[in-house]
Image (cartoon, rainbow, N blue to C red):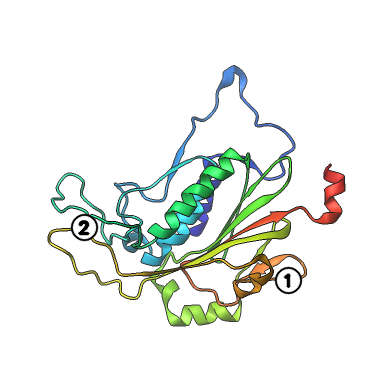
Amino acid sequence: DSKGLCSVIYRSGGLPAASFRAPHRAPGGLRAPPVMCYDCTHDNETPLQRRTAVDALPNAAAVAMAACAVGSSRGYDELIPRRIDVVKETRTYPIEKELSRGIQPLRVQLNALHQELAREGYTEVHVHEQNGVVAVSRHHPRTHHAVLMVCLGAFRSSDVTVDFMLELAKDPPRVALPGELAQTMLSARLFVPQQHHRSDPAHITGLSSSLTIRKVPDAEYHELFTVSADGQLSLPEPSPGTVVLVRTRPPAAAVAHLQ
């Protein structure tokens, strides 16, 4: 479930946000070995088999925020409906001239973000879960700037019903920003209109889907979400399969003290 996903990301690496000291090392240099976090390995069942098809996007986005090496498997981005048997499978993947299937258009950006966070020194991590919403933030220990990914997943088939989305709209999820809003990076939503898949006898193909990626000027962030006076980010039209990515900075009143 969403709490389990948070636990995996939190234990994968990075210091807790706002740590006051370096990580402790046991005598003799004993420590847990580095890990690699996957959104889906070749042995795992696909999002459609275990959760829902639209959860492929928020799951991949949350994993991209982990402070460790990350990975995926061929077919995940294309929304392959069933786990591929790497021993017995005889079909081939179709030759693609551009990355346009499933969540492929966003994958490049998620990989670039993951590399940037590591390169720029965002070594601290905070993970929060509430009512199925996973929020992962990476903090810079010196500048105290942060990058926050809000992921509205869909772990159960009931999470993608009209009734569930109407209930969400009555009480939209709220996530506390780790500072002042500095930049609206993007919002993305995956929609899978038909989860019944017609198998191709010659090629491995994914589910039909629609991925919407939106980027707006910082001053027009209200088109994607709202921010309350107490720093709570809220999605006015919440829909499972949605992610929002923002940057924050310390409040102006705190900057002088931090320096």
Name which residue type carries label 2: Ile
Q: Which residue extends farthest top?
A: 28
- What residue sits 47% from the left and 60% below the top? 58
Crowd band around label 1 with a 10 angstrom C-alpha radius: few (<14), some (14–19), many (20+):
few
Percent of width and height locating residue 185: 59, 60
- What residue sits 60% from the left and 70% below the top? 173
Q: Which residue does the numbered mark 2 point to in the structure image?
A: 204
Q: Nearer the viewer, residue 4 or 40?
A: 40
In the rendered structure, the answer to whether residue 104 lies left or right of residue 84 reads right
Tell me the mark number nearer the camera, choosing from 2 and 1. 2
In the rendered structure, the answer to whether residue 50 lies left or right of residue 171 reads left
Hey, which quadrant is residue 203 in on the image? bottom left
- What residue sits 54% from the left and 80% below the top? 167
Q: Nearer the viewer, residue 98 or 222?
A: 98
The residue tagged with tag 2: helix, strand or loop? loop
Whether tag 2 and tag 1 are in contact, CB under 8 A, the answer is no
Q: Which residue does the numbered mark 1 point to in the structure image?
A: 228
- What residue sits 35% from the left and 69% below the top? 209
**Which one is earlier in the sequence, the residue at label 2 or at label 1?**
2
Percent of width and height locating residue 211: 42, 68
Crowd band around label 2 with a 10 angstrom C-alpha radius: few (<14), some (14–19), many (20+):
some
Report, in whole angstroms, how far the alpha carbon at label 2 lies from the one at label 1: 46 Å
Q: Nearer the viewer, residue 78 or 171?
A: 78
The residue tagged with tag 1: helix, strand or loop? loop
Judge whether residue 189 can be spotted in this image. Answer: yes
